[in-house]
Image: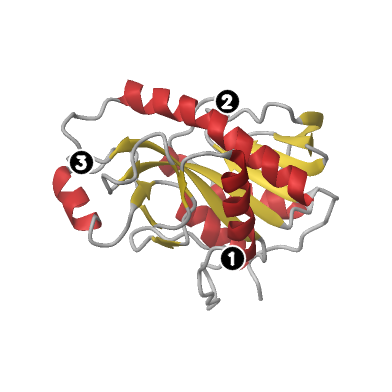
């Protein structure tokens, strides 16, 4: 017997999950919808409306109180999106770069991810095996939108998810450089859970800093936050172009 309850459907088509720096300027919000799920409450109310003519449900991943990454209720967030009738989800994820050739201020649209440490699932009491993957069609649409938006981006990369909330040590970064291109704390959970319930998922990664030990200056929280705010404008352009093309 499945541990995921059945989903009543509404009519929203695209889900966008993002951090606190993205506000989706230009979105016409029709309603704020609170949701309850068998897994608890989502991070926040969903803003449901239209962006460039496309139906959208927008969720701030960290909520109004700034939920730390290791405390986000990803199961509730994804379950609620499924209930709303979303068919595809775009995650906007803040990352640190493991490569000097991918500098802060750029965008990465990852093609794969690695998360061997803390794997969330809807199916904790039964054998339910998926083969995790990011959605190829949705990735292609994001790549085309980023190209047309004229932003600096990399069209593939491996995202490594760590647990958080702390950043990584220099030794950890040296190890992770052998396996991926960027590091974050949220995307792999969202991608896996979406696939378990049949939602297409792809990510726009905002490169907000070099990882610890890459580059010649130590990280500061203030600089990371400032870069994320600057990158938000580029991500807005990508999303707007995507909605114009698919609306």
Q: Is residue 147 above or below residue 116?
A: above
- Circle 3: element type: loop
**Neighbourhood count class around disc 3 (C-alpha, 10 Å): few under 14, some 14–19, many 20 upward:** some
- Circle 2: element type: loop
* Labels 2, 1: front one: 1
To which quarter of the image does residue 138 belong? bottom right
To which quarter of the image does residue 79 belong? bottom right
**Neighbourhood count class around disc 2 (C-alpha, 10 Å): few under 14, some 14–19, many 20 upward:** few
Label 2 vs 3, first from the N-terminus: 2
CB of mark 3 within 8 Å of CB of mark 1? no
**Neighbourhood count class around disc 1 (C-alpha, 10 Å): few under 14, some 14–19, many 20 upward:** few
Image spot of residue 115 (x, y percent): 38, 60
* Residue pictured at 62% horizontal, 28% vertical: 23
Instruction: Tell me the number on the disc at residue 214.
Output: 3
Image spot of residue 93 (x, y percent): 48, 43
**Residue position for label 2:** 64
Q: Is residue 210 left or right of residue 218?
A: right
Image spot of residue 109 (x, y percent): 49, 52
Q: Is residue 22 left or right of residue 216?
A: right
CB of mark 2 within 8 Å of CB of mark 1? no
Quadrant of image for the N terminus: bottom right
Residue at mark 2 to residue at mark 3: CA–CA distance? 32 Å
Instruction: Tell me the number on the disc at residue 136.
Output: 1
* Residue pictured at 54% horizontal, 53% vertical: 190
């Amino acid at each position: 017997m499945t541990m995921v309850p059945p989903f009543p459907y509404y009519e929203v088509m695209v889900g966008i999950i993002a951090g606190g720096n993205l506000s989706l300027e230009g979105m016409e919000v029709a309603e704020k919808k609170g949701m309850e799920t068998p897994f608890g409450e989502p991070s926040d109310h969903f803003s449901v409306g239209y962006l460039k003519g496309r139906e959208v449900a927008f969720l701030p991943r960290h909520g109004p109180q700034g939920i730390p990454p290791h405390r986000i209720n990803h199961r509730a967030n994804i379950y609620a999106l499924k209930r709303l009738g979303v068919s595809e989800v775009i995650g906007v994820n803040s990352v640190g770069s493991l490569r000097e050739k991918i500098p802060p201020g750029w965008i990465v649209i990852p093609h794969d991810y690695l998360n061997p440490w803390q794997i969330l699932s809807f199916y904790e009491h039964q054998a339910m095996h998926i083969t995790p993957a990011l959605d190829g069609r949705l990735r292609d649409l994001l790549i085309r939108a980023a190209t047309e938006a004229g932003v600096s981006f990399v069209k593939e990369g491996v995202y490594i998810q760590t647990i958080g909330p702390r950043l990584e040590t220099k030794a950890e970064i040296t190890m992770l450089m052998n396996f991926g291109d960027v590091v974050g704390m949220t995307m792999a959970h969202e991608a896996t859970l979406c696939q378990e319930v049949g939602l297409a998922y792809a990510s726009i990664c905002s490169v907000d800093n070099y990882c610890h030990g890459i580059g010649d200056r130590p990280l500061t929280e203030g600089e990371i936050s400032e870069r994320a705010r600057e990158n938000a404008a580029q991500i807005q352009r990508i999303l707007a172009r995507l909605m114009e093309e698919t609306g």
